[in-house]
Image (cartoon, coloured by chain):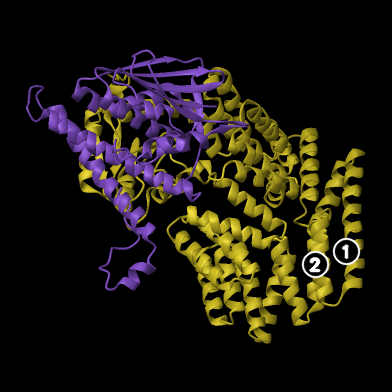
Chain colours: A yellow, B purple
Amino acid sequence: MVVVDPNRANFADRSFLLVEDFEAMRGILRELLRRCGARHIEVAANGIEALNVLRRGKCDVILCDYHLGAGKNGQQILEEARHDGLVSASTIWIMVTAEKTADMVMGAVEHQPDDYLLKPVSEATLQSRLAKLIGRKAALAGIAAAMRAKEYQKAIDLCKARLEQDPTSSMEILRIQADLYLNLGQPEKAGSLFDAVLARRDVPWARVGMAKLHIHRGHFSRARETLEQLVGDYPNYLEAYDVLAHTYQRQGAWSDAQRVLHHAVMVSPNSSQRQSALGESALHCDDLDIAVSAYQKALKLAAKTTYKTPEPYLGLARVYTAQNKPGEALKLLSQLSIDIDNDEARLQGKAAEVRVHHASGNTQLAEAAARDVAARIQSGTQNLSPAATLNLAETFMLMGNKETASKLLQFVVLNNHEDEELASRVLDVFEKGGMGDEGRALIKTTRQQATESMNQGARLASQGKLSEALEFLNEAKSLMPRNPRLLLNHAYVVIALMQKSGWRHDMDNDARRSILTARQISPGEKRCGELLAKLETLR
Amino acid sequence: MVERPPQRAMPIADGSLLSAMDMSTFLVASAHDMKNSVCVMTAYLECALADLPVEASSRAMTCQALYEAQRINHHLIQLLALYKINHNMYPFDPVEVELDSFEREVVARVLPFATAKGIVLEVISEQTERSWYFDYELIVSLITQSLHNAVKYTRSRVLLSIQVVDARLEIRVHDDGEGFPTFMLESSEEAAYGVNSMTGSTGLGLYFAAKVAQMHGNRALRGSTRLENGGALGGAIFILSLP
C-alpha cells in the first residue's frame, strides 16, 4: 500500500524548523522531511538555538523533540515562543516524543502543541499528519484568532458554523466551545454541552467539565462526588486529580488534598502550579519539610517559564516564618517583588512582610508595613483576595490593632455580602481577637447596608431614573469597589444610559472596567457574558 | 529526544548502596536509553533495506535485523507503559481518533518490514463511523505489534480489518499462516499470558493487549481481546474490540 499525499507540493514552499538534541536522530528526521518534499529546513539542537532561529524569522512548521536534555523541554520552548509572539496562529507545532507523558496531555488547551508524533517516525506518517494538520489549521484558524483576540462570542459563532459544516470534527470543537462558554461566564450553556457529549459516550474531559461547573456554583460536595467517581473509573486521568485536590482545598480537607496531589506530582512533576498546590496543602497539614520541597520545586519550574505567579513565593515565605527563619522569608519576598512586577503581587508581598515581622517580634516594622497595606486595600485601587485579606486581618488582631482589623473585615463583608461561607470565616477572625459579639453585629449591619444599596440602585434604575441611579451606584462603588453584584449593576445602568442617549467612549470604558473586574472576582458570573455581549452590540 | 536517566550511572562501591537504590529507577531509565538507540537503529536499517537491491544476499539478514530491532522497541514501549499503568502513572487519555489516519499510521509502521519480506499488506475498512474514541498511542502500539507478528508468521498475506460491530470497534489482524497453536486458543488467560519456555513467548504482548483493552471503557462496557483461527485468510486472527 502506497500512501500518496495530495499536499506533497505544499511542503516545498513551507519553512520547517527541526529541534532535536540527538545528532543521529536529527539527521534521520531531516532526511525524512526532505523525502516528504520539504526544502527549507532549519535545525536546532536545544531551546536557545530554536528560539534564536524563530527570532530571525517565523517558521511554518516546527518539529520539536520533547526531551532535550538539561535545558528547556519542548513544552517550555513552545510556551516561550508563543508568549514572545515568535509563532503565529497559523504556525504548526508538532511535538516529537518517544513516549507519551503526563505533561503532554495535561494543562490548558492554549498551551498544547498542534499534535504529537511518536518515535519512530515514518515518512508516511509524517506526510499524512502534516497534510492533515495543514488542513485542520486552516479550518480552525478563524476560531483560534478570535480566541486570541478574546472575542469569545465570535469564536462561539464560528464553532457553531464549523459544527454544521463538518460534524466529524465535533468532539474537538465541542470541547473548545465549552471552554468558551465558561470564559464568557455562561456555565449553563457549557453544562448542556457536557450533557450532550456525555449522552453520546462516557468522556472523562466532559465529566471534569461537569465537576468544574459544580465548583463554579459552589457545590463542592457534588464536585467531589463526581471527581472521586471519575478517578475510580479512570485512575490514570490526571486532570481529575488536580481538580479534585482543588475541591478538597475549598472544603478545607487539606490532608485529602495533599494525598491526591502527592500522587499527581509523582506522575507528572513538571507543573509549577501543581507543586505549589502541594506546598499549600502540606503547609496546612503542618508537613513543613514537604511544603518546603514542593514550593522550591514550584519556584524552580516557574523560573523556566514565562508564567510566574506569587503563590509559591508567598507560601514558601510562610513556611520559613513557621520554621523561624524570618531572614529567608524576607529574602524570598524581596525576590518576589523583582520577579513579578505588578501591583497585586507587590501588595501581597507587603502583606506577607507584615506577618514575618510580627512573627519575629519586630513590632514597629510590622505596624508600619501593616498601615501601608491597609490603606492601599481600602482605597480599592489595589486588592488582595478575600482569603488574603482575612489572613492580614488576623495578623492585625494578633498585633492588637483591632480597629484596622475590623475595618478590613468589614471591607471583605461589604464586597462579598451574599457569601455565607466567607461571613462565617470573617466571624472566626473576630472571635480570635475576642470580638465575637461585636463582630457578629457588625457583619449583620454591614450585610444589611450592602443589600440596601443594591436595592436602592435597582429601584432607581427600574423607575427609569438612570442618571440618579448612576450617581448613587458610583457612590456605593467607592464604598465597595470589589463587589461583583454592585459592579454589574453599575455596568447595567451605564449600558442602559448609552442605549437611551448613544454610545460614548468613556462610558463604554467605565462599563467594561466594571464587568471585567466583576469577572475577575467572580469568574462564574453569568451576567458578565451577557453584559459584555450587549456592550459589543452598542458600538 | 534523549530521555536521560535522572543522574549518570555511578560505579557502585559496595553492596549496601546497591540495595539502598530502587532498582526500578535504573530499569526505567535504562529502558528509555535503549529505546532511543533502537529507534536510530530501526531508522538506519529501514534506509539500508530501501537501498539494497532485491537480489542482494544480505537482504534477508538485514530484514531479520530490522524485525528484531522493532521487536525490542515494542517490548520496551510495552514494558514502560505497563510499568506506568501498574503504578497508576500512565497518562491515559482517550481521544477521538479518525480511523483512516489511524489505519494509515499503523500500516506505515509495518510496511518497510512487510515489503522487505515480500508480504502483501491489505486493509479492509467498512467504516460506518469515521472516528472512534481511544488512547491513540496505546492502541497504535498494540496493533503495530500484532501486525508485525502477523507479517512474521504469515505465508504471503496479512489483512487488517476495521469495522464497527454492535457499537464496538473491532480491529482484526488476519494472516494466512499456520494459525495459533491450540494451547493458546484453549488455555485460560493466565496460561496464555505466562512465560512459555517451549515457544520462547514471554506473554508480554498478549498481556499488554489485554490490559490496554481493559483500560478502555464506555460506561459499563470494557474493551477485550481474543484469538481465533480461520477467517478470511485461513490463518491466525487477533481481535481487539473497543466499546
Residue A443's label in the rendered image is 1
Q: At numbered mark 2, what does the secondary structure look like: helix, strand or loop?
A: helix
**Crowdedness near tag 2: few (<14), some (14–19) or many (≥20) residues, C-alpha within 10 Å:** many
Image quadrant where one finds the N terminus of chain A: top left
Residue A45 in sight here:
yes
Q: Amino acid at mark 2?
A: Leu
Q: Amino acid at mark 1?
A: Ile
**Crowdedness near tag 1: few (<14), some (14–19) or many (≥20) residues, C-alpha within 10 Å:** many
Looking at the picture, does residue A269 appear above or below residue A230? below
Q: Which residue is mark 2?
A: A409
The reply to whether discs 2 and 1 touch (Cβ–Cβ < 8 Å) is yes
Q: x%, y% of residue B81?
A: 41, 44
Cα distance between the residues tagged 2 and 1: 9 Å
Q: At numbered mark 1, what does the secondary structure look like: helix, strand or loop?
A: helix
Query: Exactly how many numbered labels are in the figure?
Result: 2
Front position in the image: A249 or A113: A249
Residue visible at 55% across and 77% down?
A330
Looking at the image, residue A129 sits to the left or right of residue B132; the answer is: left
Q: x%, y% of residue B235?
A: 33, 18
